[in-house]
Amino acid sequence: MADHGALTNQRRYWTWTDAQGKPQVSDTAPVGGSAGILGTGILGSKAPAATEYEERTYEDGTKVVSRFDPEKTQWVQESVDVDPSISAQHRGVVADTKAATAQTAQAEIDKQRLDLERQRIANEQANAAQRAAQEQAAGQRAEKRELTMAEYQQQHLAFEKEVQAGRMSADQARAAEDRWFKERMLEHQAAQEARANRTENRQAAAQEASNAIAAGHLGIAARGATVQEQQLARQTLVDERLANQQAQNLQFNQQKAGLDFGQNRVQNALATMPYRVGPGFASNFAQGLSTLSGGGGQVNFNPSDFQVQIPNQDQMMEEGFRRAMAIFGVSPPAVAPNAPGGPLPLPPAYPSMPR
């Protein structure tokens, strides 16, 4: 089943043909029959047979009319009409709502991606810190091999003991001591270079991490601003379309209420027609009662006693419509050209009902 949106208007009405053969429409069932004057059956009438209808209007401009079948005691669908302008607006609102939902979902995906990017940067920083710590530990182990004064003095005493023991000459001892000292100096220089390289590497890693963080923050801020602007523009468009649709629905409901008011005014006037008499009926009726109470005799009524002027239904309809529009504080639409006093047109979503 198609999704027509929410129900915006629901109306139940009855149609029938009056005694004059004119079709009638009213939001209330026709009044019952009459037994006539003093129950004699004079001017009596039966309740007209009426057909009950139900009209439903939805957000997308779809109007469904159903008829109640008394034999089957169920509603039977009569017609389905769609207002193209309202339907197009509704599709636009639905599309905008779906787009806004998709935009929100995309924004959530972008947020998750940005969170992952932040986590990646944090992991790189942690890894850089771990590498720096490992390099520092390796440098500390290398620094233990550096030349110290205590080691030099100890080695010098060892060479002197070798000379005193006669195992080497003084020249040989000095040459060995020089070689040992040069080896220690080379080790000391290598350790200093390693320390300098570690410091330089740590500074480069810190600068690289800082640049990555700054670039990530700039990208996050730019993407966040773009998403926010797109969401704001989308929401503004949705609000404008909803406001436009609500304004049209309000105008339609006001005009429909005015037409209903005019129709009820006509129906109320027609409902009193069986009980109306001519201007001479009262005097002739009083004279007849006097004759009957005095012992009887001939009672005469004139044809004009039962003739009444039928009101101008179109004029009553228009006056009722304009009065309702005045209550709402809006100007009614103009009457159709070349039809003074004629019926006012219904809004586009509601084709004119038969009168």
Image (spheres, helix red, strand yellow):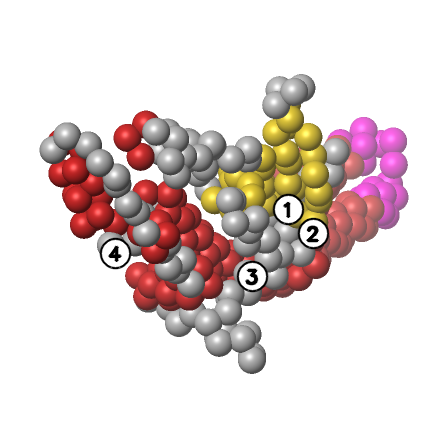
Q: Circle 2 is placed at which residue position?
A: 82
Span of residues in magenta? 161-180
Crowding near the residue tagged with mark 4, few <14, some 14–19, many ≥20 C-alpha atoms within 10 Å: few
User: At numbered mark 1, what does the secondary structure look like: helix, strand or loop?
Assistant: strand
Point out the tag, 3 or 1, that comes first from the N-terminus.
1
Query: Does label 2 or label 3 sit earlier along the sequence?
Result: 2
Q: CA distance from mark 3 to mark 1?
A: 13 Å
Q: Which mark is residue 63?
A: 1
Magenta segment main secondary structure: helix
Q: Which mark is residue 279?
A: 4
Camera-nearest residue between 241 and 340: 340
Q: Which mark is residue 5?
A: none
Crowd band around label 2 with a 10 angstrom C-alpha radius: few (<14), some (14–19), many (20+): some
Q: Nearer the viewer, residue 171 or 329?
A: 329
Tell me if residue 259 comes above or below residue 34 in the rendering. Answer: below
Nearer-N-terminus badge (4/2): 2
Q: Nearer the viewer, mark 2 or mark 3?
A: 3
Pointer 1 or 2: first along the chain: 1
Using the rendered view, name the quadrant where residue 222 is placed: bottom right
Residue at image position (55%, 35%) is 50
Report whether residue 232 is seen: no
Depth check, front residue: 238 or 245: 245
Report the Cα–Cα distance between label 4 and label 2.
Answer: 51 Å
* Mark 1 closeness class: few <14, some 14–19, many ≥20 residues within 10 Å: many
Residue 15 located left or right of residue 250 = right
Relative to 9, is 302 on the left or the right? left
Q: Which mark is residue 347?
A: 3
Q: Where the C terminus falls, by quadrant?
A: bottom right
Q: Amino acid at mark 4?
A: Pro
Query: Which numbered disc, 4 or 2, marks the residue closer to the eye?
Result: 4
